[in-house]
Amino acid sequence: MDIPSPYRVSLVIPVFCGEKTLPSLIGETAPLTFEQTSPGGNCFVICEVLLIHDCGPDQSDKALEDLSVEHSFVRPVWLTRNYGQHAATLAGMASATGDWVAIIDEDGQQNPVDIGLMLDYALAGSFQLVYAKPTNTLPHGWLRNAASRTAKAISAKVLGNKAIGNFNSFRLIDGEIARTLAAYCGNGVYLDVGLFWITGRIGHCPVHLRNELGRPSGYSYFKLFGHFWNLILTTGTRPLRLITLMGFFSVVLAIVISGYAIYGKFYGNIPVQGWTSLLIVVSFFSGSILTALGVIAEYLAVTMGIVMGKPLYVVSSKPTRSVIRK
């Protein structure tokens, strides 16, 4: 009887500030590079670990070089400059060769051992994409956790797809889908939105998250808001429809205010102050118009970036050195 070959999993790790955390993370991953059986009885092996150097402020480049010499399964991918986590992730997906592509962060919060569990979940449910679903409270402050839940809830409403409200940076993706998305996903497209464009079977596997190793999160609230806004802009035309509804509501409100003012003037003997009502109406509609124009301008900016052919990332054949910021 033929013994089925193990599922080959490519592990993609975007690296921005991984100088201190990568050695421990790769040490945890090393045992998984040998054929083994998952908790569900599936044979798998991590065939490669792709470390995407996103040119952060520490000496991650030295760590990548040392790890690639120490471990044959480590493959550095050098970006020419800092492009951001999603672009770095797509660069790793494009270089992956495995049957499945697993994506984890560099900070050690996600346990590589859980990849076998997520593979079982994907195979049992015939899923093309599996997100980690934390079973514990995320190891961040309450304010950031609350903001994250709110942003995901808004995103799910805007997209009209409840599943996207449960996305996580710990993902397991069918290899063909990962490489296809990386081949055509353009600049300005949010990674998880792109995944939802081409996947129909999405699962969420319960896992336990750990505390980050050796450093706090590299995401400020400003950066997180930027990711949220990019997510909204790339969901489609629903935000533009919201602007249309807002404009319609503004017109209705103006008619109601006008009717109330006319009724008060002629039937209620109520003096109507012209300057006050004029200031309210002008302020309200000016704000509505500026909001609409701002959102439309953001859409045009994203479209122009795609049309002009701005590259999402550029890979170099030689190591790129980090710029140490003092």
Image: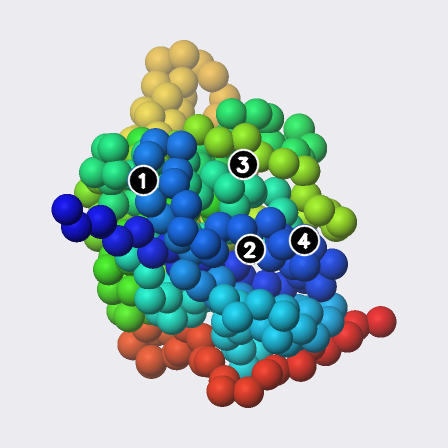
Callout 1 crowding tier (Cα within 10 Å): few <14, some 14–19, many ≥20: some
Q: Which of marks 4 and 3 is nearer the N terminus?
A: 4
| Mark 1 vs mark 4: in front | 1
183 left or right of 12 in image: left
- Tag shown at residue 24: 4
Q: Mark 1 points at which residue?
A: 42
Q: Mark 2 points at which residue?
A: 30
Question: Where 215 falls versus 307 (above or below)?
Answer: above
Secondary structure of the residue carrying numbered label 3: helix
Q: Are marks 2 and 3 in contact (CB under 8 Å)?
A: no
Q: Earlier in the sequence, mark 1 or mark 4?
A: 4
Task: Identify which residue, 70 or 321, lies in the foreground.
Answer: 70
Task: Identify which residue, 156 or 216, lies in the foreground.
Answer: 216
Q: Who's the residue at 26% across and 38% down the image?
A: 123
Secondary structure of the residue carrying numbered label 4: helix
Query: Residue 137 appears at what percent x and percent y?
Result: 59, 26
Q: Name the residue under label 3.
A: 148
Q: Are marks 2 and 4 in contact (CB under 8 Å)?
A: no
Q: Who's the residue at 33% across and 35% down the image?
A: 41
Find residue 141 and report its image quarter. Answer: top right
